[in-house]
Amino acid sequence: MLPGLAGLSIDRAPPLGVPLRFLLTAPFLAALAGAALAAAGPAAVAARLGGPAVAVAHLYTLGFVTMVMCGALLQLLPVVGGGAVPAQRAVAAVVHALLAVSPLVLGAGLATGTGAAIAAGAALAAAALALFCAAGLAGVRACARGQDTVRAIGLALVALALALAFGLLAALARARWAVPAGPWGTLHQGWMLLGWVGVLVMGVAWQVVPMFQMTPPYPSAARRIPLVALLAALAAWSAARLAGAKDASAVALAAAALALAAFAAVTLVLQARRRRRLRDATLDAWRLAMLALLAALACGLVAVAWPGAGPGWAWAAGTLYLAGFAGSAITGMLYKIVPFLLWLHMHRRLHPRPGATARVPHLRELLPEARARRQLRLHALAVALLALAAAWPPLVRPAGLAAALAWALLGVELARAALAARRALAAAG
């Protein structure tokens, strides 16, 4: 048995196909987002709220970030909390299909300004997210009480539901369908990025950082205080935005940034105290994620608080947060979670009864460290180029190409791991 699995309900893990379809598909949608960004070119920096830039953001956020998170939650809820998402096979099949198609349709509509495609893509995405929120919250209710990670997952799902509601209001207001103009789009972004992504990465980190990186556990205060502070700040920020109170909105946003910064600082300290001194790609990916998060928060505060801040500061904040923080943390998780799921599947197949002796390949045999590190170097280059494009927009094209190559390589490596597992099972008879 692998180290670090004590306390987990491994026997409750879903069938391999339930989470794996999400995790193997997502990198290739991220690669499409990188290619689309390269095609958009330098204009994306100045017009970050224009059609092509918004199309890339939705393709990446829905097709990659949310796709991976949905697959991870289908695995984590039963294993960490002992609960189960109802009708998990059917839910996984429908949500995966909708999340695979909706970013493409929505992205094409946003890039070209085609209203019918925007409406169709938004409807497909809304159906996927609504179904997943309902099924996920039912799974959370079925879990054992008192699990901090499960509690964070539930709160992240609530944040996703709010982000979906605000996104629909923004779409209806834009189409002038009985919804008055308001800060719906801004609220959608805040709850999607800080609520859904921020809260979920925080909660998942409490489980996977100690487990896979051999660090001490997060202290109880470090788990609860930043989470409560972040959600309280998001609620206050939303109220201030709806009331048009700009100063209060800025203060609440600064409080949310401090909560996320505290999480990043604690994670870096725990990583410095890890029991295993040998570095690996997962550790470096998470370190990159935490450093990028701190840099993103700093750039975001400049963009909000400095009246003379140009569009480059907001661009740097957004790219560092999405590609640097979320993208790096997800990459680090995929390096371990996909081989672990494959290992678990093989262990179940090859050791169905006590005394079975068929050999199960180790995680690093499925995804060798050298290959993971090669992909991570290309990803880090893409993150750096994306951030530097804030100062020199022509870097957007090479940054997009580097990102596309990095994500495509990640998808290829994960697919190779799955094929290696299949060959091992075939060889064992």
Image (cartoon, rainbow, N blue to C red):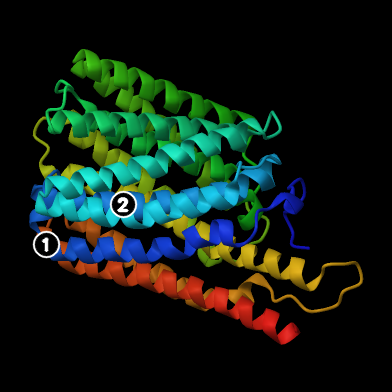
Residue at mark 1: 41
The reply, left or right, for residue 345 in relation to residue 375 is right
Q: Which mark is residue 101?
A: none
Q: Point out residue 258 in the picture as x, y percentages from the top left corner.
A: 39, 30
Work out whether residue 424 or residue 306 is closer to the camera in this orientation and state it: 424
Residue at mark 2: 102
Nearer the N terminus, badge 2 or badge 1? 1
Check the image and report above or below for 141 versus 32: above
Quarter residue 307 falls in: top left
Check the image and report above or below for 295 versus 171: below
Q: Point out residue 368 in the picture as x, y percentages from the top left corner.
A: 56, 76
- Which residue is at a point 24% across and 54% down the rendered structure image? 105
Quarter residue 397 falls in: bottom left
Check the image and report above or below for 240 versus 378: above
Amino acid carrying mark 1 in the image: Gly
- Which residue is at a point 28% across and 36% down the rendered structure image? 189
Q: Nearer the viewer, mark 2 or mark 1?
A: 2
Amino acid carrying mark 2 in the image: Ser
Q: Is any atom of residue 143 visible in this view?
A: yes
Work out whether residue 351 or residue 100 is closer to the camera in this orientation and state it: 100
Work out whether residue 427 or residue 397 is closer to the camera in this orientation and state it: 427
Q: Point out residue 399 in the picture as x, y percentages from the top left corner.
A: 22, 65
Total marks placed: 2
- Which residue is at a point 38% across and 41% down the rendered structure image? 127
**Badge 2 density bin: few <14, some 14–19, many ≥20, Cα 10 Å:** many
Q: Is any atom of residue 56 visible in this view?
A: no
Dot 2 lies on which element? helix
**Badge 1 density bin: few <14, some 14–19, many ≥20, Cα 10 Å:** some
The reply, left or right, for residue 198 in relation to residue 168 is right
The quarter in which the N terminus is drawn is: bottom right
Pick out the residue farthest to the right. 355
